[in-house]
Structures are given as structure tokens and as C-alpha cells.
Amino acid sequence: MMYFARWKVIAIWATIALATLLCVPSFVPRTSLGSLGEALPWRQFQLGLDLRGGSYLLLEVDMDAVVRERLDNIQDSVRSRLRGANINYTGLSVRDRTVTLRLNDPARAQEAVRLLRELANPIVTGMGTSQPDLEVQAAPDGTITISLSEPLLREKATQAVEQSMEIVRRRIDESGVVDPIIARQGANRILVQLPGVQDPERIKQLIGKTARMTFHLLDETANLDAPSPPPGVMFLRGEGPQGGEQRYAVRRRVEVDGANLTDARAGQNPQTGEWVVNFSFDSIGTRRFAEITRANVGRPFAIVLDDRVITAPVIREPILGGRGQISGNFNARSANDLAVLLRAGALPAPLTVIEERTVGPDLGADAIRVGTIALAIGFVLVIVFMVLFYGLFGLFANIALVVNLVLLLGALSLMEATLTLPGIAGILLTLGMAVDANILINERIREEVRRGRTPLNAMEAGFRRAFTTILDSNLTTVLAMAMLYAFGSGPVRGFAVTITVGILVSMFSAFVFVRYMMVTWYRARRPAALPV
């Protein structure tokens, strides 16, 4: 047990050397990382919002909009399905998360129910089984109610939040913000932390737009002064050709969806110098765009973004190349922002900012300064204490403590972890636990010496007896940290990760590195008594 093979010695020093190398980039400015060379994948741990300053946003996904969209789709499907079966009805409407209608002939209720149940999609539950996402019921008077099932609502919420997180991440990345933290919080909320961003207004504007772009034909026969649009048409506001607000009669049918866009870039019209957004479609969008423009030459074609008409130019000739241009009252920034939104894709539902905080960099600098002072003072006190109480073995423990800190910072750098105030507290706590482990080992060795064991036997018995106690203690702490990680979020999770990594590292430094130093010292000196 107190013998170290050559390969073990090499592994110990290789681990320490690698951890030291991994630590270096975290203390080098990000702009200077290239000077370190490309031989290693240099990584840094990041400072969190509370240390670096920045903005904190808590967003909420509008689940009512998600449900409403599904109900609207169901309503359209019901209309076409019953019309195809020649089943007459009245009062088709959406109310309180249900679609209701009343058959003119109640005797055909079962036939209608069978047709409408075919609209359901299977939802896979947690037990591996599936069940329909719609519940269709018929009353004796011919009233049919179609309601959304609970598994569907849960799945819709999960999909909407996960998709929204991905879209938000793309938009923030495109805006140039470095190292944002985007995490799910609760059932329908998204936490966004933007280190270094003191004015989040532009980010809020980017995030807050659903950015669903669709292409529609205009209904030129509709009366724009009418209080309500004709069937299949909707009145939307937008900027007119001469400036100012204008009402458009837009056909509900989506001719081309913005989901088929592959690229969007801000640019300037070479003839007028105005800022525009150039876009291009994928193969499906290109084919559909060509068909529409070929069949509707001379008719206005509206580009709609979030229920607002951006522009409605007249189709002069078929557009076959899958490329187009959005013109409007753009400047360089608004054109670039629109291009970013289109490239990132549309949100599945609107997002609402329900909490916003801005942390100044001065507070973070103070926290770092205070944390560094606390760490330095604690380190010096521990070194003095260990040397006074345990002599040479205390000095070994102090060296192990330094190695422990290097290994911990190297692991955090490798994981590109985000260091927050709770993270600093976690580092201090793990260093304290590492000291405790060395104290337990030295105390056990001291007890064995008092029992009359030889130095080598005392060291071996001391490590063996201390191992069980320290392992049990650390194991319970790891389990507690696992619960924190599972149920916590943001800095709480960072604290749990720091403690867990710190425990693993302290086990290595206490039972491998300290033991290696003791064995090396013993072989070199062959003492008659241990200095403990």
C-alpha cells in the first residue's frame, strides 16, 4: 500500500502538470489566447454575472399562444374534414381550450366523432405507451367537444421552451454577446444571463420578437373600410408605399413560410442606396416561391412579420432563383437586426420579460477582491496551523493544498465552468474539506505511533483508517450536491459542481499525492520516528 510503481509516479506528475497547463488560459485575457499556440484546446472558466457584471433576464413562454395555435389548426381541420364527409354543422368555435360545434343531424354524431378522432396525434408518455392528444366527445343533442389532453399540453410546453431556448441562443450569439448563460427554469421560463451587457434593451428587442415571417397574396377585392374582413382574409397593419400606416387585406393562406429561409443578410440597394434585407430559400421554398410568383404576375405579394406587413410589392416577373429582397424604412441597425431574426428562426410562442436585473461591474470587482483576500488569509492561516500542529507532515498537507487548488481550477477550466460568488464559496469550502482530510490522516497516524507501530506501519494504518471515514463523509456530501444540481439552477448548480469536483480532487491530493510525498520522504531518510 505504501509502494508506488513507476507508472503511478508518472501518472501523478502528469496529472499535476496537465492541470497546471489547463489553469494558465484562465489567467490570460481572452484576446491573447491565440498567443498560447494551438497545440492544446485552451479553455477558460468564465466569471458569472455576479462577478463580471451584466444583465439578468427571466423570460416566460406564452403557453396560451401555443395552445391557441393548436386549437386554430384543429378548427381548420374540423371544417375541412366534416365538409369532405358532407356532415353539416353550426357554431364551430374555440372556447376555453376546446373546439365545439353542433351537428344539424345528431344521428351522425358517432360518424363525426370517428372522423374527428383521426385528427389526433399519438403522444408518447413516460411509461413508453402512447395516447391521443385529443379527446372527442359527443352529447345527445349533437354537440361535439374536442379538447386537448394533458399529455399534449405538457409536451407542447416542453417543446416550446426547448425550441425557444435554442432560438434565443442563436439570436444572442448573432448579436455578439460573449458567454451568455441560457437555462430552463421551471415549466415555462427561461433564464438568460448576459455577462458584460449593461444595457440589455437591444437584446430584449431581439428576444421579444416572435419573428415569424410569411408570404401572402393580397385580396384586392376586399373593402378595406369594412369593420371585419371577408372569410379567408385578415386585416393587417403595415407601412404604406408613401410612408405612414396602411391597412392591408391579406389572405390567410400562407403561400411561402419563412421557415424555408436558408439565409438573410443586411445590404444596400445598389440603385437607391437604401438598406434592405436579402434572403434566400431552400429547395422547397424556391420551388414554392417560383410557382406563386409565376402564377400571380401583376398582383401584390405581402411579406408579413409578426402579423405586420413589412412590404407588399407587386410581382413584376416570376422569381425563379429562390432569392428575394425585403425593402422598407430600414437603417443599418434595423436591417441587421431583422436579418439576425430571420437567420435565427421564429419563436414558437411570444416571450415575455417578467424579471430584469442589471449588475454593475464594480460590484463584481469588489466581490472578486474580497474573495481573493479571504482566500489568501485563509490559506496563510491554514499553512501556519498545519505546520505548527503536524510539523513536516503538515508541510506536506500544505503542498497538497496548493496542488488541490491547481487541480480544481484546471478541472473548472476544462469544463469551461462559470465561476460565481457561490462558486468561490464552494472553492473555499472544498479547501477546508481537503484540510480536514489531511488532519484526519495525521491524527490516525499519530494514534498508530502511540500504539507502538513502526513508522511505515503507522503511516499505512493511518491512511487505511482515515480513508473509510473521509469516504463516507464525502459520499454524503456528493449526494447532497447531486440533489442541489438536480433541483437547483444557475449559481446553485455551479456551487454543486464546484463542491463535487473539489471533493474528487481533494481525495486525490490527500490519498495519492500526500501519501506519495510521505513515502518518498521515508525512503530517502529512513527515520526511526515520525515527525507527527
Image (cartoon, rainbow, N blue to C red):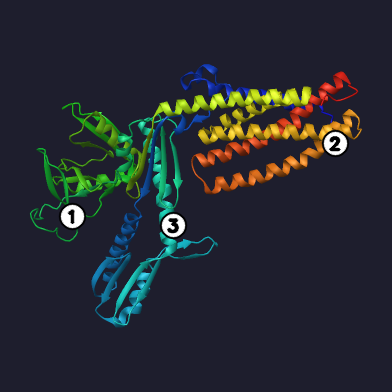
Residue at 13% x, 59% y is 228
Q: Position of residue 485 (x, y in %)?
A: 55, 45
Tag 3: Cα neighbours inside 10 Å, few (<14), some, or many (≥20)? some
Specify few, some or many for label 2: CA neighbours under 10 Å numbering under 14, 14-19, or 20 or more: many
Q: Nearer the viewer, mark 3 or mark 2?
A: 2
Q: Position of residue 433 (x, y in %)?
A: 67, 35
Q: Are marks 3 and 2 in contact (CB under 8 Å)?
A: no
User: Dot 1, how many residues are within 10 Å of its Cα: few (below 14), some (14-19), or many (20+)?
Assistant: some
Q: Please state which amino acid type lies under the numbered disc 3.
A: Glu
361 up-or-down from 234: above or below: above
Q: How far is mark 3 from mark 2, CA to CA?
A: 57 Å
Q: Quadrant of residue 222?
A: bottom left
- The reply, left or right, for residue 381 in relation to residue 162 is right
Choose mark 1 or mark 2, whichever is in front: 2
- Three-letter amino acid code of the residue under disc 2: Ala
Q: Does residue 1 appear in this view?
A: no
